Image (spheres, rainbow, N blue to C red):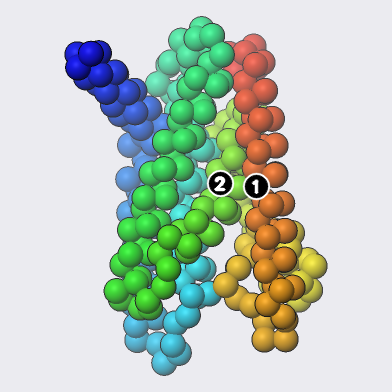
Amino acid sequence: MENQKSVFISIVSELVRYNIKVVFGSKFVYFLGGSFMFFLLITGISLFSSSVPDIASLYYQLLFPALLLIFFPTVYGIQNDEDARILEILFSIPNYRFKVWMVRLLIILVMVWCVILLLSFLDYFILLRHNIFVLSVQLMVPVIFFGTLGFFFSTVVRNGHGAAVVVIVLAVIAWFLEILSDSLSVWVWSVFFNPFDMPSDTSTVVWDLAVARNRIYLMVVSVVALLWGLLNLQRREKFMR
């Protein structure tokens, strides 16, 4: 029994290690370094700023590093398989899209969440006392949204650079719509909605309802993008070039 347990643990650890190596690749270190540099830059500015940081500012401060981390492994995942010349092998696995990519996405999200928890923990001691768990969970909603969206477009475009351009353009458009809009009904649909930045003229009940709706909308779109992307992986002939 003990031998079977040790073998199972060994297989799982090797599976996780191998998928991390393939999905994140050698370029991920640059995204990780860029995330930490951006975090240190904004944290330094906040420390020497005359304004007092609040939980809403911490949310935006950590959002960009989190999106950087989720961007590369989801958008470039399939291209990394092709570059490593293992895409044909993976397609030979029954139910490849579920056995491989569901595990990979789970690994990616867990790793990104761990980094967010670390950055939130640092902010807790450097800038502001806050609920680390609540902040990290709220940040994971747009992270999951952009992660699944990046995965979906990677299955449609079938090229990492092309999918990256599409996701970046859509993110820029969403950001401009966020800046230009001043209506709560529009914010509910926004992917950059800040659940901690409640306007002074809005009641708590209305704001809590808006936050709940926004999170539900984003998660529903995330599930649809994930399932659609997995269905696209059935079209093996489109990925074999």
Return the mark for residue 219: 1
Q: Assess whether mark 1 and mark 2 are in contact (beta carbons under 8 angstroms).
A: yes
| Image quadrant assignment for residue 208 | bottom right
| Image quadrant assignment for residue 13 | top left
Residue 43 in the image, given as x and y percentages of width and height: 36, 74
Vertically, is 49 above or below 20? below
How many residues crowd mark 2 within 10 Å: few (<14), some (14–19), many (20+)? Answer: many
Q: Which is more toward the observer, 222 or 209?
A: 209
In the image: residue 190, left or right of residue 8:
right
Residue 147 in the image, given as x and y percentages of width and height: 55, 43
Residue 189 in the image, given as x and y percentages of width and height: 74, 59
Please tell me whether mark 2 sits on a helix, a strand or a loop.
Answer: helix
Residue 172 in the image, given as x and y percentages of width and height: 64, 58
In the image: residue 138, left or right of residue 120:
right
Q: Which is more toward the observer, 138 or 68?
A: 138
Residue at the far front in the pictured view: 1
Q: Residue at x 51, y 26 (%)?
A: 101
Q: Quadrant of the C terminus?
A: top right
In the image: residue 58, left or right of residue 217:
left
Q: Which residue is mark 2?
A: 144
